[in-house]
Amino acid sequence: MRIITDQQERTRFLRFLVVGTIGAMVDFGTFHILVSLLTVPALWSQTLSFTVAVSSNFLWNRYWTYPDSRSKPIASQIATFFVVNVVGLGIRTPIFAWLEAPLRSLAERLPFLPLWILTADILGYSVALGVAVLVVLLWNFFVNRYWTYNDVE
């Protein structure tokens, strides 16, 4: 794999991870605002927060991770990036839906959970979302690298 042997690919992957970390913060922050403050249902919240994070990630990836990818028209690149990420959402949503209820139930039984700071719902949602994000990370990197940003040497 080029990511192991090529320094430039390793740098891109590390930048992709930084962008992904920023995206995860945007994702989790938006999710918790929607769920906790606006009482939007969790499944809808994770979809909306994903959309906000993908928008942030596109901009960071286009201008920082793959600055040499701007030979493609931005509209084409946005469309490709969003298709990849919608498939990622299709992977992520069932994982989140499958994990969130059991993880919230498990969190309710934790004897050390400081309920005044962190509720069982928030802990369960956060862990479910974190697992789903990590699974989709690899999909997003490789497909975006070799399709969305395939004009990069």
Image: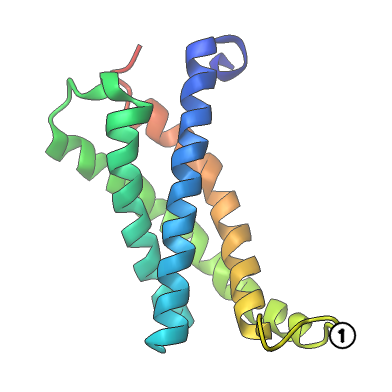
Rendered image coloring scheme:
rainbow
Q: Quadrant of residue 81?
A: top left
Q: Quadrant of residue 66?
A: top left
Q: Is residue 76 rendered to the left or right of residue 81?
A: left
Camera-nearest residue between 145 and 49: 49
Q: Position of residue 63 (x, y in %)?
A: 27, 31
User: Is 152 above or below relative to 81?
Assistant: above
Looking at the image, which residue sits at the far right?
111
Q: Quadrant of residue 5?
A: top right
Badge 1 density bin: few <14, some 14–19, many ≥20, Cα 10 Å: few
Q: Is residue 56 rendered to the left or right of residue 4?
A: left
Question: Can I make out residue 40 in this image?
Answer: no
Q: For the N terminus, which image quadrant?
A: top right
User: Is 36 above or below relative to 140?
Assistant: below
Q: Position of residue 26 (x, y in %)?
A: 41, 58
Q: What residue is drawn where x is 71% and y is 88%?
A: 115
Q: What residue is drawn where x is 71% and y is 77%?
A: 103
Looking at the image, which residue sits at the far front?
116
Q: Amino acid at mark 1?
A: Pro
Camera-nearest residue between 104 and 82: 104
Q: For the C terminus, which image quadrant?
A: top left
Q: What residue is drawn where x is 12% and y is 30%?
A: 73
Q: Is residue 48 rendered to the left or right of residue 97?
A: left
Q: Position of residue 97 (x, y in %)?
A: 56, 74
Q: Which residue is mark 1?
A: 111
Label 1 secondary element = loop
